Amino acid sequence: MARVPAQASPPAGRRSGVVKIAFALGLVLFAQALLALSLVSAQQLLVPRNMPFGVTGPPSPVVAEVASKVGLDLTSYKDQAALTDAADRGELYGGYVSGGATDTVVVVPAKSFFAQTELEPAFVAAAHKLGQPVTVQTVAPLASTDPVGAVTSLLLLPLLIGGYLAAVLVYKAAHGTAAAPWRAVILAGYALVGALLTDLIAGLGIGAYSSSHFWPLLPCFWLITSAVALAAAAVQALVGKMGTLIVAVLFIAVGGPPAGGLGTYLLPVYWRNIGVVLPAQNAVTLINHVLYFGGSDISTPLTVLFLYAFFGIAVIGWFGRIRPGREAARTAPLPAGNPPDRRRAMIGMLVALGVCAVMQCLFATTYMSASHAPKADNLPFGTVGTSPVLPAAQKTISLKVTPYPTEAAAKTAIDEARIFGALVSSGTSNTLIVVPSMSDLAPLDLAVRFEEAAKATGQTVQVQQYAPTPLVPKDPFGLVQGLMLVPLLIGGYMSSTLLMAATGRAAGRWRAAQLAGFAVVSGLVIDLIVCYWLQGFPSHKFWITWPICSLVVAVVAFVAAILQKLLGPVGTLVTVVVMVLFGNPSSGGASGVPYLPAFWRDIGPYLPPRNGYVLLHHTIYFDGHGTSQALTVLLVYLGVAAAVLIVLDLRRPEAAVPVDATEAAAVSVPIGATP
């Protein structure tokens, strides 16, 4: 009797596994796309928009000239004293005093360093054009430990992520119970510890701000971390496990980019309005005004943050009292269970909070130490001819000078991304060539130093901008490549993490192929969003950028898969430490590697983020010059990681790894999403 052939359709279990894998990778792709869209659209074009600006005296043609080109919201004051008092309270980004023999431009660096770099030259240039003498008065200057006003946003990282991770990890340690009455006490207690650690590390340890601010900032840090942790726990109580993802989207992916650390009135209007109702922007305003404006005008951020904290306490308390059934009953071991159960619960809780504290300390240490006070060290620089201006400038900025025979030769070196600028001298005439596509900070730094040196030596210097591929209008400061690197890194380790959750194993027969396929699709999606939707770089670079994006995602994903194979779910945290906590700060970003401290400058070449950034940036703006080392390092990472992953899978059988998909996504989504 002939046999009936077996049905060719796959078993139900296999179909279910495919669906789980597709859902997991789809979730990662959504998170990546949302983060890329939020980060880049919020911060790619930082220009004044309805920026509060004070004026006093008779109507000035200088103000009219600037206001026609820059988005200012003008407020009149009765005299100069009233205007400067408002600036001292942090109400204004600047001001203009007219009516005397000499007008005065008032700048407020502590309100926004980047706003000052926009407003001051605009008013000075307009005044000179109209023949009006003008002086500059500085109100609320930045501290020497915070020369570009980065400390406020860097402080937000450990506070925001620490509060969120505390809620997520305590929820996991409590076996998915979010509404126990003791939850609010534990989270508020951890928030105090986390706030104290952040204050000690950033202030007394690194010296990002003076010790006199330690006590005023401590309750602010406590409130910020408490608001995030308690609100996250409340959302978990309302909607269960998916609450962790909802909070990640609201507080990190959507709430982080419009935090406004560089100045809220530099943000697009819709992002500024979104940020007003979320914790991050209010936290930034609170920290900034306590740090630089004596705590004035903080009633709104205090109110919003307290409302988030009270909302969290109310929801946690309400659900903990009226729902003693299936979900709340699982929290009963603390007051009524057996002593061993209570001990195990307490140990799990302490371990979870310990992990959170370590991560918060690392965020406070790594990003702050790498970025709070950028200062050039051996900045590659070219010179043509001789001039007393160069040695005078070298007294205030560290340059690695290379002589060139002609201006054309110096520009060729710029074309090949070998120098950040050049001084071309002929007699008493000097031209300073700066390269805005090489660094957002170096052109301003070089211009200030060389103009001061020219005055000191009785010379003149003219500043000229030059770049092989000019920055696009939607990215005038060269910020986009650093911003798009974050979702690429997160997508890499998150894809491996959620595949582990979907399959129950850290590796598998087709794991490398699955991750590689995801990397190709992920790179395409990020490239489409940033290039065509947000116009973050020239469209003719689309096709060459796609494989670079995919390469970065694949490298991080393969490394994460290896660490997860060896360490289990802990491998995700190790990947975060390597790629985000050490790799991302050492990338150099938009400011450039010469502005990193020595430690970060030295470890960067060995980690994927630096090489990924260099490959992206130099390919887009320097036609691929200076990318051979970066490409080689990433390809070596990819090849070695793929080989190791295959060998481990063949030679190292493993037991199932029970990881819930929402927990895995919640832990991995927010980390590295820099506000």
Image: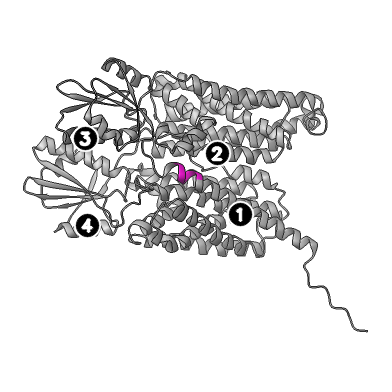
Q: In which quarter of the view is residue 641 placed?
A: bottom right
1 or 4: tag closer to the N-terminus: 4
The residue depicted at 39 percent of the width and 54 percent of the height is 537
Q: Amino acid at mark 4?
A: Lys
Task: Decide which of 108, 223 is in the foreground and name it.
Answer: 108
The residue to which callout 2 is attached is 252
Q: Nearer the viewer, mark 2 or mark 1?
A: 2
> What is the magenta range?
38-42
**Residue at figure coordinates x 10%, y 37% from the top left:** 457
Q: Find residue 202 and report its horizontal and vertical position in percent.
A: 44, 30
Q: Which mark is residue 17?
A: none
**C-alpha gap between disc 2 and disc 1:** 21 Å
Name the residue nearer the viewer: 546 or 387: 546
> Secondary structure beneath disc 2?
helix
Identify the residue at image location x=30%, y=38%: 69
Q: Amino acid at mark 1?
A: Ser
**In terms of secondary structure, what is the magenta stretch mainly?**
helix
Foreground residue among 264 and 484:
264
Query: Mark 3 or 1 closer to N-term?
Result: 3
Residue that badge 3 annotates: 126
Q: CA distance from mark 3 to mark 2?
A: 40 Å
Disc 3 is placed on an element classified as helix
Relative to residue 663, is residue 591 drawn left or right?
left
Q: Is 486 situated above or below 552? A: above
